Amino acid sequence: MEPLIVSGSLDSLGKIGQYIMSAGKEAGLEKKASYKLRLAVDEIATNIITHGYDEAGLAGDISIQAEINEQNLTVYIEDTAIPYDPTQAEMVTEETLQQALEKRPMGGLGVYLAKDSVDKFMYKRVGDRNRNILVVNRVV
C-alpha cells in the first residue's frame, strides 16, 4: 500500500485508523485481528504524538506504511520524535492488571496493549527516526 504521512497531532488518529483498517481488509484479516492491529497502532501513534512530540516540545510527521505478503501484514510506523524504544519499556505485570483502577500507576498500558495485540513487535532507530514494526500473521 502507499504510505500515509500525517502530522504528529491527535487530529491524525482518525486517518491512521482508516488506513490500518483498509490494510487489514486488503490483507484479508479477520475483523478481530484488524481491530487488535488498529488498537496497537493507535496506542503507538498516541504515544508518539503525546510523549515524543508534544511533551518534548517538538513537531513532526508520522509515516505509516503497510506491506502485505503471503504470510503477514507488516505495519511500519516512523517518526522523528525523541528516541524511544517501546520494546525496552517495563511491562505491566499481571499483579498490576489485577489492581483496582484507582490503585494502578499511571501509564504503561499502551505499550502493553500494542505488544499484546500483534504477533510480532519490533523497534529500530534508523538515522534520526524511530521505526516501530508491527506484524500480524495472515490466515490464508
Image (cartoon, helix red, strand yellow):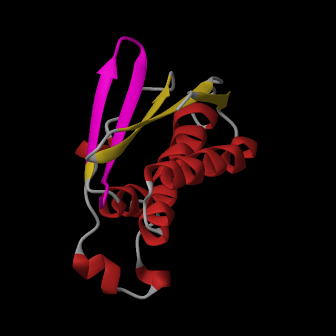
Q: Position of residue 73 (x, y in %)?
A: 37, 45
Q: Position of residue 18 (x, y in %)?
A: 65, 50
Determine if residue 78 is in view.
Answer: yes
Above/below status of 81 relative to 108: above
Magenta-highlighted residues: 121-140
Q: Quadrant of residue 129?
A: top left
Q: How many marks?
A: 0
Residue at the outermost top position: 127
Above/below status of 78 relative to 19: above
In which quadrant of the rendered image does the C terminus lie? bottom left
Residue appearing at x 59%, y 49% in the figure: 22
- Main SS of the magenta part reads strand
Q: Position of residue 38 (x, y in %)?
A: 52, 57
Tell me: 129 left or right of 13.
Answer: left
Above/below status of 26 relative to 99: above
Q: Position of residue 17 (x, y in %)?
A: 62, 51
Q: Is residue 14 magenta?
A: no
Residue appearing at x 63%, y 23% in the figure: 60
Above/below status of 112 relative to 22: below
Residue at the outermost front position: 140
Residue appearing at x 70%, y 44% in the figure: 15
